[in-house]
Image: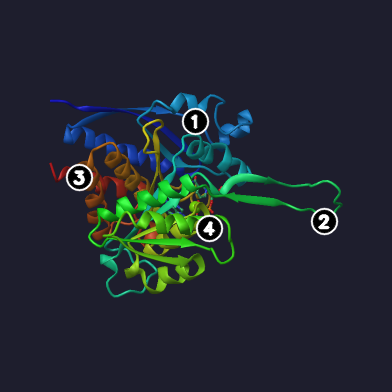
């Protein structure tokens, strides 16, 4: 029998990142033994804020070189109260997403059974949608500057530019349509702020219109981001695949996961589909310093990200098993504190693993 073998680059990062990554790897390890369809090895990289405090950089200089031949990157979270957030973000997570041209960030929003959530909706358990975030340009272009010459104290000026390229817009919008084609209701919603940002976002709109003509089966609509924030709350049943810029989709995805109950349950995939670089899988949440070290972090976002990783690696059945086990676990009321329970990180993972076992 031909077993697949994977090399994972594991970057636990800071705070609860380490706690939840361990749990995700326990699930993958268990699946590899029970399903007998794949084996994997993990290479650990100790990068993050502690590494920064010791070495003055978030990752090794040749960091990207060292992980570019792995099959996937499994990422915890970064951020530490004593390191400025723009340093930790640009030094590691964005360095990987942009350095490896991981141009789409896929963020499903799921309403898990047994989880209260904040959304008041009659058919909540049936709702699910997916945000597709442009992941390499837009508002995160990193282009700008401060301290322009000739200005004194109290008169500082900062410029922060967004970059939208036709190719960058097109590949992520096209991917959103491809995802929509696989869903029961084929619909893509584009989100911009073209009334205020008349260059980049108008280009985005034009590309959206052009690409949509290649997908006559797919229903489309276009919303401004402020109205879309309201729509998430008022008409979530209208959402299927939502495609938006780097910043807008980031904000909307936190809103989506809060509606679904907690940031702790939201998974994500940073994908590069052109075969040159590995993709990276991580929960949406950060390092949560307020609860780090207590063993109470919700592991579901990170375990769900492992499911996205296995699916990406061609193991759709195994990915489905993880997702079913997550749903069975929350349905049983085995929940961490952020979603109203009293279970520990470990207990939730144990329950997920035992649901997986019961399928073999
Ligand atoms: P956060 O996501 O770390 O925490 C926000 C709130 O949600 C906190 O109250 C936290 O306890 C809770 N929470 C998050 N994940 C949870 C989980 N798995 N289980 C239970 N509760 C959970 O965002 P925050 O506080 O804005 O940022 C903390 C640090 O994380 C900062 O340094 C920030 O820069 C960094 N960050 C890193 C990200 C990444 O690595 N991808 C993403 C977002 C923030
Ligand atoms: Mg975010």
- Judged from the image, the secondary structure of the residue bearing numbered disc 4 is helix
* Dot 1 crowding, Cα within 10 Å, few <14, some 14–19, many 20+: some
**Image quadrant where residue 235 sits:** bottom left
| Residue 188 image point, x, y percent | 35, 60
Mark 1 / mark 3, whichever is N-terminal: 1
Q: Is residue 53 visible?
A: yes
Task: Judge from the rendering whether residue 335 lies leftward or rightward of residue 227; answer left or right.
Answer: left
Which residue is nearer to you in this view: 156 or 282? 156
- State how far apart marks 2 and 3 are (Cα): 60 Å
- Seen at 52% across and 52% down, the residue is 290
- State how far apart marks 4 and 3 are (Cα): 44 Å
- Seen at 70% across and 51% down, the residue is 159
Mark 4 / mark 3, whichever is N-terminal: 4
Mark 1 / mark 4, whichever is N-terminal: 1
Residue that numbered label 4 is attached to: 201
Residue that numbered label 2 is attached to: 155
- State how far apart marks 1 and 4 are (Cα): 38 Å
- State yes or no: discs 1 and 3 in contact (Cβ < 8 Å): no
Residue that numbered label 3 is attached to: 356
- State yes or no: discs 2 and 1 in contact (Cβ < 8 Å): no
Residue 332, compared with residue 98, is above or below; it is below
Q: Quadrant of the N terminus?
A: top left
Q: Which label was assigned to residue 46?
A: 1
Q: Quadrant of the C terminus?
A: top left
């Amino acid at each position: 029998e031909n077993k697949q073998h994977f090399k994972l680059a594991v970057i636990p990062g800071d705070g609860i990142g380490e706690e939840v990554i361990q749990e995700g790897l326990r699930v993958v390890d268990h699946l590899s033994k029970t399903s007998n369809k794949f084996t994997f090895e993990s290479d650990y990289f100790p990068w993050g804020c502690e590494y920064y405090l010791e070495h003055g950089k978030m990752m090794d200089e040749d960091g990207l070189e060292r992980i570019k031949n792995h099959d996937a990157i499994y990422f915890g979270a970064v951020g530490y109260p004593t390191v400025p957030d723009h340093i930790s973000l640009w030094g590691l997570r964005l360095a990987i997403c942009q350095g490896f041209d991981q141009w789409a960030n896929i963020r499903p929003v799921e309403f898990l059974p047994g989880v209260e959530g904040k959304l008041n909706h009659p058919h909540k358990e049936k709702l699910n949608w997916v945000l597709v975030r442009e992941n390499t340009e837009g508002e995160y272009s990193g282009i700008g500057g401060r301290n322009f010459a000739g200005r004194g104290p109290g008169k500082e000026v900062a410029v922060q530019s967004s970059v939208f390229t036709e190719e960058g817009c097109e590949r992520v919008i096209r991917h959103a349509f491809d995802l929509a084609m696989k869903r029961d209701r084929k619909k893509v919603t584009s989100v911009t702020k073209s009334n205020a940002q008349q260059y980049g976002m108008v280009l985005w709109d034009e590309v959206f219109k052009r690409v949509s003509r290649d997908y006559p089966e797919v229903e489309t609509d276009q919303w401004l981001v402020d109205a879309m924030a309201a729509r998430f709350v008022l008409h979530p049943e209208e959402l299927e695949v939502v495609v938006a810029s780097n910043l807008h989709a980031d904000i909307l995805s936190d809103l989506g996961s809060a509606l679904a109950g907690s940031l702790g349950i939201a998974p994500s995939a940073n994908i590069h589909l052109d075969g040159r670089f590995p993709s990276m899988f991580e929960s949406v949440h950060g390092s949560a310093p307020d609860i780090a070290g207590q063993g109470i972090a919700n592991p579901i976002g990170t375990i769900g990200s492992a499911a996205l990783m296995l699916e990406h690696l061609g193991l759709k059945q195994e990915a489905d098993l993880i997702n079913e086990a997550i749903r069975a676990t929350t349905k049983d009321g085995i929940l961490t504190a952020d979603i109203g329970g009293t279970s520990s990180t470990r207990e939730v993972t144990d329950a997920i693993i035992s649901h997986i076992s019961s399928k073999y």
